[in-house]
Amino acid sequence: SKHEGPEKYQVNDKSSIKHVVGVISGKGGVGKSLVTGILATELTRKGHKVGILDADITGPSIPKMFGLSGQHVLGQDDKIVPAESKGGVKIISTNLILQNENDPVLWRGPMLMGALKQFYEDTLWGDIDYLLVDMPPGTGDVALTVFQSLPIEGVVIVSSPQDLVQVIVGKAVKMAAMMDVPVLGVVENMSYMECPDCGKRLEPFGPSHLDEIVGEFNVRDLGRIPIDPRVAAACDAGTFESELPSGLIPDAVETVEG
Ligand code: ADP
């Protein structure tokens, strides 16, 4: 292998995980958790057993999206029982461990890594077809360690049509290449917005760069997600699973499905 990293984590003998797929972004706030949530919801609707390992340890937003705000995971012997959403997605996240989910997570390197290792190794996942990993944003130390420690088969990159997006996506592509992890493709979030009055497509963050990205980095176009206040509201209200319209990013879902 090209990189000498820490040992890969091993899942416990009460769990079996068929595929581990990462969702990454070059920077925070572009919709990485949203895309993780859409993939989880759609794969579950198709009959797969899905888990989400929220590795965005200092900025976790998955539990709230899935209506698990304020819940805590339980211990069983020396293992963790993951929380389960109404739709049946198994979820582990720092927010499900903290006494008060509004407290900031001030952990540094070793503690973050310890949490991550437990999230993978000590969680009673059971049978999982797809474990989606909401990766830490950016291309720093924590993201690299997640890559090195989990058996990630491929990554979906999330971008938004903003300045310097090529540079940012380029970093994510390079990180995946360094770790020998295939890039499954790129989803562009907040691509456009439809005017509720006239239906005209507006581009509040500027024109899409997805075609250029796909050409420059030779990656697959996995679709565009519009800015939709209903999506933001459903994330906040925890009603995401029941209210998510189908077919937002079908190519991304099919590509992860393999
Ligand atoms: P990240 O995981 O990259 O930090 P999130 O997925 O948490 O980003 O999204 C950041 C915020 O933006 C969330 O509050 C989310 O509800 C909102 N958001 C993301 N994508 C959209 C969208 N397409 N339409 C409306 N709101 C969105």
Image: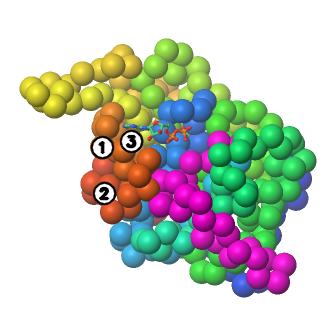
Upstream in sequence: badge 3 or badge 2: 3
Is 70 in the magenta? yes
Residue 232 image label: 3
* Residue at the spot of label 2: 243
Q: What amino acid is labelled 1 in the image?
A: Arg
Taking depth in this image into account, of 30 and 143 the one nearest to the observer is: 30
Q: Residue at x 80, y 64 (%)?
A: 118
Q: Is residue 153 left or right of residue 89?
A: right
Q: Residue at x 42, y 23 (%)?
A: 161
Question: Where, by quadrant of the figure, is residue 245 drawn?
Answer: bottom left
The response on whether ligand 1 sits within 8 Å of label 1 is yes
Instruction: Residue lying at the far left in this picture: please name it.
Output: 198
Is 82 in the magenta? yes
Taking depth in this image into account, of 10 and 201 the one nearest to the observer is: 201
Q: Circles 2 and 1: CB distance less than 8 Å?
A: yes
Taking depth in this image into account, of 199 and 148 the one nearest to the observer is: 199
The response on whether ligand 1 sits within 8 Å of label 3 is yes
Q: Circles 1 and 3: CB distance less than 8 Å?
A: yes
Q: What amino acid is labelled 3 in the image?
A: Ala
* Residue at the spot of label 1: 230
- Distance, label 2 to label 1, CA atoms, is 9 Å
Q: Which residues are magenta?
A: 58-83
33 is higher (above) or lower (below) than 77: above
